[in-house]
Image (tube, rainbow, N blue to C red):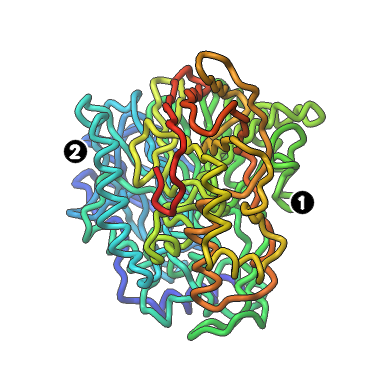
Amino acid sequence: MRRTLNLLLLLLAFTTASAQSTFTSALKAKAKGKANLYGVVECDGKPVEGVAVSDGYQIVLTNKKGQYLLTSEKRNGNVFITIPSGYEALCDGNDVVPQFWAELSSDTEAVERHDFALKAVNNDRHVIAAVADIHIANHHNDLSNFRDIFVPRLKEEIEQYRKQGIPVYTFCLGDSTHEIYWYDYLYDIGDFRNTLAEINYPTQFFNTMGNHDNDGATPCNADTDFNATTKYRKAFGPTYYSVNIGKVHYVMLDNIHYINKPGGKKAKGIVGSRNYIHDFTPEQLAWLKKDLELITDKSTPIVIGVHAPIYRYKNGMKGKINISLSEPSASEFTALLRPFQNVHILSGHAHRNRTTYAAEDKSQPEIANIIDHNIVAVSGSLWYSSGFGGPMLGSLGEPAGCKIFTIDDKDIKWYFNPTQLPAKEQFRCFDMNAVRDYFKSNGEARVFFDKFPDRTDYAKWDVDNAVMIHVWDWANDWKIKVTENGKELKVVRKKAENPQMLIGLDLPNTLWLHKFDKKNNKRKMHPHMFHVVTSAPNTTIEVTVTDRFGNEYHQTMERPKPFSVHMK
């Protein structure tokens, strides 16, 4: 088989990396019949029955002795378990990647034993830190920003749960690295795995693939999508797998079909344009069908981690839903999830916050059970805004950060956790009088709008005494209330460009770097913008935003309020 031959050659090319799980159980196990994979799953020396074991194609369950048998073509190069509820897989030393998988030899005829060790833990209550688009490339101070700013802030946020004895896990939604720089700056996906151990990352780390985690040195052919994952699989194991934590079933999938056709931006070691489409391979969907068939209780929450968002509002605000997957992936994926009552998609890729309730689209009842959480990047905009001396901002101006999910039994709640601010701050208020004055008087801003006339020039803002409020993780079941002198003001939701993003990211990224290409003339309109008009320029207003869980976030805005890159 051509694909198997390519796998063998690529495995031989990376012989320096060791297999993930090297645990050997003292419990007896023996291969039988035609099985070429066998082993034991144990906890504290005792067998664990009913654990799902897979090679990415088949799924078998361990017997009473904790043993499994598989007859495998070893196509994916690994064998892995679905960690059962009430357990964790072990980590080795400072490593934070759980040992739930083992690398296979290249010889399909070889009979191999691979054992897995678990430890018992009460995780019916647990916390997930959903992170995305870390984009470590060994430049723009990205390593130090990740180590010295993001990680300490995450530790601070999750400490409150640790004190209660609640376990915390990280789910990374892809683009941990940036493949166009792998060979120029000598930092690839394997180096990222080492970084997690070196910086003492604070939780176990479950990863999935992003488009930038594929190897751009892979030539374009029928097997590119698979072959481009070789370095990823050496570092993090299977590109699709599942884990049970408490009463929730989590599945990590790869919805990036990497093509890398010839052409594109030239960079050291890169042989193609690094292009891709959004879909799942038939092998993934066939495996997912088998995985979900093991979940007999359809009230079990299903949480699926992918890189690119799947369900999104067509107009960016509400109503009609677009499904980003290519066919037949979209139909097959939706059908597999339909039997379950409560499905959450965790995604990154877009570097912005956007929560999509698929139930709002009454014309597609088959997706009514799904919420897609698109999560802003840890890197903001590839670490550019912080590299320019400003705050870490996402692609549409919200703060860089992650999303925290708190799970109690089958109840799932969530909130946005900004990296450079406390979690109690969920929005920013702009005094548009001050914004207008800034854009009128700032020389660089005047040059910017001369170069890019289609962008929003707030020097031309024509509504006096207005306030614009950017609610970073707004969802359609949230509420906002603004009062002035006890009187409630009319609040209008209207897409707009974030003025802080314009001066903190777009202006230096174009003028300072002399990047005057036409794509920078396109407006970056954010749907989470709210507008009010006050009675005077110097009154104080009260702003209260309430999320779906009844949590209230409040600010007293004294005006005039200064506007700047580092405004609060």
Identify the element where label 1 is drawn: loop
**In the image, what residue occupies the spot 46% across and 25% down?**
412
Reading the image, the residue beneath label 1 is 327
The reply to whether the C-beta atoms of the residues labelled 1 and 2 are less than 8 Å apart is no
**How busy is the neighbourhood of tag 2: few (under 14 within 10 Å), some, or many (20 plus)?**
few
When the figure is inspected, residue 173 is found, relative to residue 452, above or below; the finding is: above
**In the image, what residue occupies the spot 46% across and 51% down?**
132
Residue 289, image x, y percentages: 61, 40
Query: In the rendered structure, which amino acid carries the disc numbered 2?
Result: Gly
The answer to whether residue 238 is visible is: no
**In the image, what residue occupies the spot 44% across and 45% down?**
562
When the figure is inspected, residue 406 is found, relative to residue 372, above or below; the finding is: above
- In the visual, does 444 lie left or right of 49? right
- In the visual, does 358 lie left or right of 141? right
Reading the image, the residue beneath label 2 is 45
**How busy is the neighbourhood of tag 1: few (under 14 within 10 Å), some, or many (20 plus)?**
few
Residue 541 - label: none
Residue 394, image x, y percentages: 50, 52
Q: CA distance from mark 1 to mark 2?
A: 47 Å
- Residue 423 found in image quarter: top left
